[in-house]
Amino acid sequence: MILLQSHSRILIETLSNRVQNLDKAVELDYNWVEFGDVSAKNPNVLLLSVSLPVPPPETVFVGGLPYGAIEAIKSAYGSVVQILDPPRDGFNLTLKINLAKLPTDEERKQALLMKIASVREVVLGAPLSVVLKHLLSRTVAPGLDGLLALVHRPNESFFLFPQAERVTVVYPMRFSDSVDTTYAASFLQEFVETRRTAGLTSAPVCSWSPDPPPELKEASAEPLSANAGFVSFVIYPRHVEGGKLDRTVWNLSTFYAYVSYHVKCTEAFMHTRMRRRVEGMIQVIHSLILFMFILHLFLETLIDGKLNLVFLDLP
C-alpha cells in the first residue's frame, strides 16, 4: 500500500522554478484541477488561487473557507503569504506569495516551499487540526463540541465526534460503480482485520459497519447514504503527540482518496489477471485447433488408403 503525499508536485515544481529564476521576468499562468490557478507577472510575486470542493449543507464553512483556515494559513506561512480579499472570481481563496521574503537558508526555504505546495492540507485540514490540537490538552474546542461535518469531496463529507479524551472520525464510504463498491467493502473489512495484528496495537482503533455508528445518530439522512458502509477511527492524544499532528491530519483528510486509489489498483490488477488467463486459454485453443487440423489430415490419409498400417500378432 502507498501513502499519498500532501504536497502538489506541479505546484512545488512551479515554485522552485520561479525561485531559481527570479532575475527573469517570465509571466506565468498555470491551471490544474487539484488547486485551481497560479499566475505571476512580478518576478517576486506569485498569486495562488484555490478552488475547494463544493461543501454539503452540513459542513462548517466560514466566509467560504473551512473553519480555522485563515488562522492556519497565517500560522503556516507567516509574512511570506498574504490572503487577498476578495479572492479571484471562481475561487474560494487567493494567496499572494512574496518570494523576496523567503528565508535565505536553503533548507528552510525548501521546507517553506513544500509547505506552500501543501496548501490543500493546510486549508481543508484546518478544522480537523483545531480539534486534534485541543485533544492534546484533553479539551474540546469551543463551539466544536458536537458532531462536525468536514468536506473532502464535492457535496460529500466525513464526520468528527470530539471528546476530551478522544476524537472519533467516521467516513460514509460512497462509490458510484457497483464493482468499486464490492471491492471497497472487502478492502475495508480486511483493513480492520489487519489493524488487529500484534504489530499494530498502537494504531488508532478502526471499525467497519454496513450501518451508521452511534456517533452519527444526530446526522441527517442524506449524508448517511453510504453503499460501502461506514469506517470509524478513534484518535487518542498519543496519535498526535510528538510531531504527529500534521501527518495525522493529512492521513485522515485523504482517507477516502487512499481507499479509492487502492480500490482502482485492485480493479486494474484483477483485469490484468483476467486478461492473462484469457490469453492462456486462447493459446490452449490455438494448440487444440492445430492438433485437430493434424488429426483431420491423418484421418483423411487413412481413409484414402494412402497409409499402410501393420498389425503384429503378439504371442
Image (tube, grey):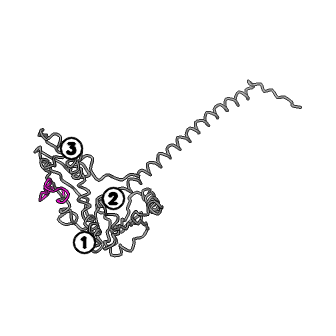
- Under tag 3, what secondary structure? helix
Q: Quadrant of the C terminus?
A: top right
The disc at residue 16 is: 3
Q: Measuring 61% from the left and 33% from the top, which residue is drawn there?
A: 290
Q: Residue furthest right?
A: 315
Position of residue 39 relative to residue 229, above or below, is above
Magenta stretch bounds: 74-91
The disc at residue 251 is: 2
Disc on the earlier residue, 2 or 3 = 3
Cα–Cα gap, marks 2 and 1:
21 Å
Q: Measuring 77% from the left and 24% from the top, which residue is drawn there?
A: 308
- Tell me the amino acid under the disc marked 3: Ser
- Under tag 2, what secondary structure? helix
- Tell me the amino acid under the disc marked 2: Asn
Cα–Cα gap, marks 3 and 1:
37 Å
The x, y position of residue 240, in whole percent, is: 31, 63
| Residue hosting label 1 | 141
Cα–Cα gap, marks 2 and 3:
25 Å
